[in-house]
Image (cartoon, rainbow, N blue to C red):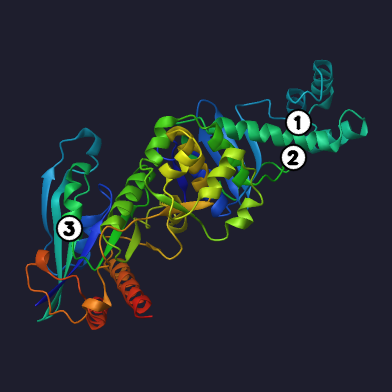
Amino acid sequence: MQAVKMVVTGPFSAGKTQFISAVSEIDVVSTERRISSAAEQIKETTTVAMDFGRITVGPDLVLYLFGTPGQRRFDFMWEILSEGMLGFIVIVDSTRPETFREAKRILETFETYASTPFVVAANKQDHSDAWEPDDLRIILSLQNGVKVLPCVALDKESVKNVLLELLYSVLERMDEEDR
Amino acid sequence: MALKGNLRDFSTTQLLNLINLARKTGTLSIDGPQPAQLSFREGKLIYASLGNGQNDLAHVLFEAGKLNTKQLQIIQSRAGRTSDKQLGHLLIQAGYVTQSDIIQSVRQHVLDIVYKLFTWADGHFRFDANRLPEPDRITIPIDLESVIMEGSRRLKEWERLQHELPNLDVALRFTERPDARLRNINLTVEEWRVVSFVNPRNNISQIARANNLSDFQIRRIVYGLLQAGLVEFVRQQRTAPVVSKTNSTAPPAPEPVEQQSPSVKRSVVHRLIERIRNL
């Protein structure tokens, strides 16, 4: 059995758990706890360990999706989770500009862990106050080659599109390395 | 879609950089210590107003020393609802000012406002696309690159600079086609010295030492260059590429996942794509 891993990361409450839940064939295994910090009480519970979803491709191949905990005090887990990943997805809540700086920090940190392809998912694009993906690209200082994709983490088709775009980026990287 | 937030999360520099790069047209409203509005056309700053008055042409010319107090009072008493453009024509025809005086004064008024905004650390902002000043206002197109550079020079917030550039052990390189941008920017001697050392082999600390610059000085200069889009970081990778053709013959990784080989074949990626398409 070959297992392939993708990491889903992003700031606190960006929609990582919803993203994985939208496509996982198993109920997402997540360790959620009631939130104690007043500053982080946007939602009632949050992921303190990690989310874990699975998509079985065949008897010999499975794709695992790992979601990183969004709170800063669990930063130490990021490098562990990133080990051996095929690529990673940075989820950004497009309606919360106060989290963009944190998203940039997370993205830059993951870039140092491995030179794997990654995409940015601009989540909550169905909200009227969402920032446009092109504006996110500029504010996150992303190079033109990095895909910034509109996303609604509650919508399975939207999540599938993000995963597919990441896989296309992986293939493009392979092509570049073959040249 | 909306473009709104708080200056606590985005500096004025970042907002102007966004508007410049995206070539946006519209008006940025900021609820800071005073209400401020900046208008842009295709990424160029064209108009600014601060507070609830004294942004009309007569006051702008008075502040610039082109009109004296008596002239200002006469204009205010007689001009009534005369628009800025009409007033400008009248003043030129009357020989009070020249066209160049008006352009220079309006330009300086706009710049004074925008530089003031660089020091604001708090305040809700909102960008309304395609909303422009009233047509009777005099607008002067100003390149934002130079505004960003000058605003960054005036930026005294050491903490923010340290936050934006926490690590000086990274190298810089020029972005694509910096020459086109350099033509429109006025660099100080110190900035030119730093630019001359930009090279992927030199980290920021080394550039600072070579130019006898303090950490604060080099941060301020590099921050300005970054925000103006002239340079970018050269990121150091700590590990080898995960997807590597040289490992493509490695045996399939056993579970658990934490111990898997990072090697993935092209055929595996194609199978993943096919599976996700059919979800």
Residue type pointed to by label 3: Leu
Task: List the residue tagged with mark 2.
Answer: B138
Q: Nearer the viewer, residue A161 or B243?
A: B243
Residue most toward the front? B210
Q: Nearer the viewer, mark 2 or mark 3?
A: 3
The one nearer the camera, B165 or B210, is B210
Asked if the residues shown at circle 2 and circle 3 are in contact, with their CB atoms under 8 angstroms apart, the answer is no
Secondary element under disc 2, as helix, strand or loop, is loop
Residue closest to the eye, B35 or B22: B22
Judged from the image, the secondary structure of the residue bearing numbered disc 1 is helix
Residue at left offset 31%, top offset 73%: A170
For the residue labelled by badge 3, is the local secondary structure a helix, a strand or a loop? Answer: helix
Instruction: Let me know if residue B127 appears in the view.
Output: no
Q: Nearer the viewer, mark 3 or mark 1?
A: 3
Relative to A126, does residue A173 appear above or below in the rendering?
Answer: below
Q: Quadrant of residue B177?
A: bottom right
Q: Which residue is mark 3?
A: A81
Residues beneath discs 3 and 1 located on the same chain: no
Q: Residue at x 75, y 40 (%)?
A: B136
Q: CA distance from mark 2 to mark 1?
A: 8 Å
* Mark 1 burial class by Cα count in 10 Å: few <14, some 14-19, many 20+: many
Disc 2 from disc 3: Cα separation:
57 Å
The residue lying at 41 percent from left, 34 percent from top is: B160
What residue lies at 37% left-to-right and 47% top-to-bottom? A100
Observer-nearest residue: B67 or B258?
Answer: B258
Say left or right for B84 vs A149: right
| Residue pointed to by mark 1 | B57
In percent of width and height, residue B144 lies at 61, 45
